[in-house]
């Protein structure tokens, strides 16, 4: 069976002015449809880079990323854009943007602009998905008036509105209340499970990842995984340590 | 804080103290036989504790010897011709639990095996250490995966305690993983500079 998403020997680095820093070093990861994966890593561990590559937002320096068997890096930017809009949703609490004077329902509905829906249809779908994430009560509120918890739910609604097959989440809910955080993550897990959406979620807090099917940790460009349920164990080999390739 | 009479804290010695303390709490909630208490303990603490039923029987006997539990031979619910020991709290159980709640936790050694290896490793062992550290990190991730998730709806005191227990496991595993990652990084940087 073709995995929904696969990263094969993916490397990504940047130049810090003095030297080349390898953020991901020949990382391999596979994700089947409907599987939930939690990526644990500290700040600057490379987890955001991994997620942006997985979501098709960034492209690797070397290696291949396949979504549903198609190499993302070889797609035209138009094709890639279409894929991102229709099949993969990316959410990060840090990316919250809202237009002044915009209502929550409008905020979610405008994300469906290129779906070929009428304004009324887009609004109806927005309302449905806001109800799904228990945010129906704030549909007519201004986005600027939302609490952090409400924002997280509205962002999730916006991500779910296009009915993606893969939801990529990078620290989706940095909420001050631990109870609100637990409720958000429980809602996220339940929604993904009910709708058969694959989840790839990263956090520097392990409690955020509880209940997910597979745990992966990331540090120093390398992944370690519990790999089960059809998710391939990432290769631990490092370029500069060729002798230990293939081990676990 | 209640006075710490050495006689009253004798049961708090040794590595099994947390399990003995948790058993006292369970006995105060309701009496039970060894198997029942072992199941309740495993449900409360989670899979990561790997509670052994035989250990629970042994700990209950110890608690009975110190006067913190008392057992009675009672007929089994589903077979009245057979009996089993049912454990009950004593008059001293509640005070002992309070004392335990107030007592500072002892310092515990961490990751002994890996530390011992690191302390005497030769340079040619670097790759073996990296493998061992990765395996340890994976073991910690597997343990984290075993922790049952909260449903996020808990409002009761019992649900809060369960969430705190989960958090304790996650906090410990996070720190273990971060240590393993830092150690791998140190070794990798060393090897990199060696060329």
Image (cartoon, helix red, strand yellow):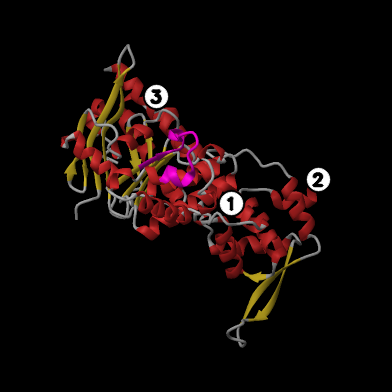
Q: Which residue was labeled with disc 2?
A: B4
Evaluate whether label 3 is on the same chain as label 2: yes
A145 sits to left or right of A89: right
Say what secondary structure mark 1 lies in. helix
Q: Which residues are magenta?
A: A90-108
Q: Which residue was labeled with disc 3?
A: B186
Mark 1 neighbour class, 10 Å CA radius: few under 14, some 14 to 19, many 20 or more = many
Name the N-terminal-most of marks 3 and 1.
1
Separation of residues labelled 3 and 1 (CA atoms): 34 Å
Separation of residues labelled 1 and 2 (CA atoms): 30 Å
Q: Does the residue at mark 3 contact the one at mark 2 (Cβ under 8 Å)?
A: no
> Which residue does the image show at 34% across and 37% down from the upper left?
A51
- Residue B57, compared with residue A235, is above or below; it is below
Name the N-terminal-most of marks 1 and 2.
2
Name the N-terminal-most of marks 3 and 2.
2
Disc 2 chain ID: B
Residue A146 locus on image (x, y percent): 55, 41
Discs 3/1, front: 1
Separation of residues labelled 3 and 2 (CA atoms): 45 Å
> Which residue does the image show at 39% across and 46% down from the upper left?
A109
> Which residue does the image show at 34% across and 16% down from the upper left?
A16
Question: For the view shown, which residue lies furthest in the right direction?
Answer: B3
> Which residue does the image show at 35% across and 20% down from the upper left?
B190
Say what secondary structure mark 2 lies in. loop
In this figure, what is the number of numbered marks? 3
Discs 1/2, front: 1
């Amino acid at each position: 069976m073709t995995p929904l998403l696969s990263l094969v020997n993916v490397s990504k680095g940047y130049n810090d002015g003095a030297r080349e820093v390898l953020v991901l070093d020949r990382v391999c990861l596979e994700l089947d449809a409907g599987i939930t994966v939690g990526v644990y890593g500290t700040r600057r561990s490379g987890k955001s880079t991994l997620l942006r590559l997985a979501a098709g937002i960034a492209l690797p320096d070397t290696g291949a990323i396949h979504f549903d068997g198609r190499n993302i890096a070889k797609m035209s930017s138009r094709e890639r854009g279409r894929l991102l809009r229709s099949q993969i949703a990316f959410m990060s609490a840090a990316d919250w943007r809202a237009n002044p004077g915009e209502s929550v329902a409008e905020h979610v509905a405008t994300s469906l602009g290129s779906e070929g829906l009428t304004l009324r249809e887009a609004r109806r779908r927005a309302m449905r998905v806001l109800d799904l994430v228990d945010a129906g009560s704030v549909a007519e509120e201004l986005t600027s008036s939302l609490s952090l918890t409400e924002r997280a739910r509205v962002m999730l609604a916006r991500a779910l509105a296009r009915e993606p097959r893969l939801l990529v989440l990078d620290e989706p809910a940095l909420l001050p209340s631990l109870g609100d955080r637990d409720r958000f993550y429980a809602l996220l897990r339940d929604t993904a499970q009910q709708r058969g959406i694959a989840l790839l979620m990263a956090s520097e807090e392990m409690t955020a990842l509880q209940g997910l099917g597979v745990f992966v940790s990331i540090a120093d460009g390398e992944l370690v995984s519990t790999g089960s349920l059809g998710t391939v164990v990432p290769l631990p080999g490092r370029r500069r340590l060729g002798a230990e390739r293939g081990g676990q | 804080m209640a006075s710490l009479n050495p006689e009253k804290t004798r049961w708090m010695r040794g590595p099994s103290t947390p399990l003995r303390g948790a058993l006292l709490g369970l006995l105060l909630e309701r009496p039970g036989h060894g198997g029942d208490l072992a199941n309740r303990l495993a449900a409360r603490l989670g899979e990561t504790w790997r509670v052994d039923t035989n250990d629970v029987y042994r700990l209950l006997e110890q608690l009975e010897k110190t006067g913190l539990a008392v057992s009675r031979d009672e007929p089994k619910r589903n077979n009245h011709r057979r009996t089993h020991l049912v454990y009950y709290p004593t008059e001293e159980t509640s005070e002992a639990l309070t004392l335990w709640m107030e007592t500072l936790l002892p310092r515990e050694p961490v990751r002994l095996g890996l530390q011992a290896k690191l302390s005497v490793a030769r340079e040619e062992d670097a790759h073996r250490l990296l493998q061992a550290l990765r395996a340890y990190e994976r073991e910690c991730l597997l343990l984290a995966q075993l922790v049952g998730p909260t449903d996020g709806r808990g409002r009761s005191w019992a649900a809060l305690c369960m969430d705190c227990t989960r958090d304790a496991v996650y906090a410990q595993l996070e720190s273990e993983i971060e240590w393993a990652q830092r150690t791998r990084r140190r070794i990798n940087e060393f090897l990199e500079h060696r060329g």
